[in-house]
Image (cartoon, helix red, strand yellow):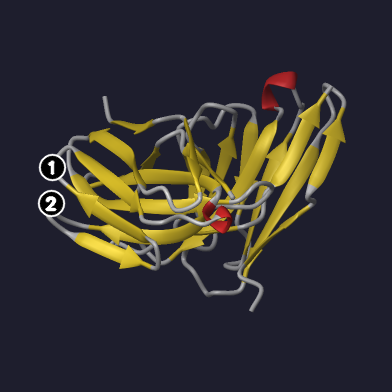
Amino acid sequence: EDQVTQSPEALRLQEGESSSLNCSYTVSGLRGLFWYRQDPGKGPEFLFTLYSAGEEKEKERLKATLTKKESFLHITAPKPEDSATYLCAARLDSNYQLIWGAGTKLIIKP
Amino acid sequence: NAGVTQTPKFRVLKTGQSMTLLCAQDMNHEYMYWYRQDPGMGLRLIHYSVGEGTTAKGEVPDGYNVSRLKKQNFLLGLESAAPSQTSVYFCASSFPTGVVTEAFFGQGTRLTVV
């Protein structure tokens, strides 16, 4: 069964304390791995797409990486405004569908 | 540029009532989707459309119907609401998935069925 699992469910960090969020996937064929950010009361907002193992993408304090089994979202020296829920999703080779993880709620304390 | 707009933002229904959620996008996207988001679970696809006049079932279609009469609009209907349909509903749109592009989401509709 195609599945995407995110860990941890929640992560509390002090401002400036770097860490990583994990997205592990078990899918029949991966066409792309997406990361989104979701603020409370809003829809998900696109961050990155990764297509193949070894690929990395960066945006400000965020860097996403991809292996054959998982993706990491690294957050370097986070600020309170980075607090949000981070979602990952895998697009399957076989069809249109995105398989979503349940998300990691990130809280950055000043 | 509005992007994806959902109406209403909040709604409370009694069990058995019906309602329609409206999604409008101004990005000329071919594909549109309706998801529901429940605590502790990933987004789940209800129905989707690959173009004007076409619709298809997603992962959790039971109890919902959809229509796409115009390219820019995608309607989600609940004919007889049940408490299990209490959720946050998101509409999204994208270019055709042959090109691996991201989906753009609306701000969501929080629906409570009592």
| Chain identifier of the residue bearing label 2 in the image | A
Residue A83 sits above or below residue A101 on the image: below
Q: Is residue B64 left or right of residue B104?
A: right
Kind of residue at badge 1: Lys
Secondary structure of residue under mark 1: loop
Q: Are marks 1 and 2 in contact (CB under 8 Å)?
A: yes
Secondary structure category for the residue under label 2: loop
Indicate the position of residue B36 as horizontal and vertical percent values.
Answer: 58, 37
Q: Position of residue A54 (x, y in %)?
A: 12, 55
Name the foreground residue: B58 vs A4. A4
Residue A53 tag number: 2
> Alpha-carbon distance for marks 1 and 2?
5 Å
Q: Earlier in the sequence, mark 1 or mark 2?
A: 2
- Above or below residue A3? Residue A50 is below
Residues at discs 1 and 2 both on one chain: yes
Q: Is residue A97 in sight in this rendering?
A: no
Categorize mark 1 by other alpha carbons within 10 Å: few (<14), some (14-19), many (20+).
Answer: few
Q: Residue at x 22, y 44 (%)?
A: A94
For the N terminus of chain A, which image quadrant? top left
Which of B7 and B64 lies nearest the eye of the viewer?
A: B7
Would residue A19 appear left or right of B86 to someone viewing this image? left
Q: Is residue A26 left or right of residue B56?
A: left
Q: Which residue in the protein does label 1 denote? A: A68
Q: Position of residue A99 (x, y in %)?
A: 37, 39
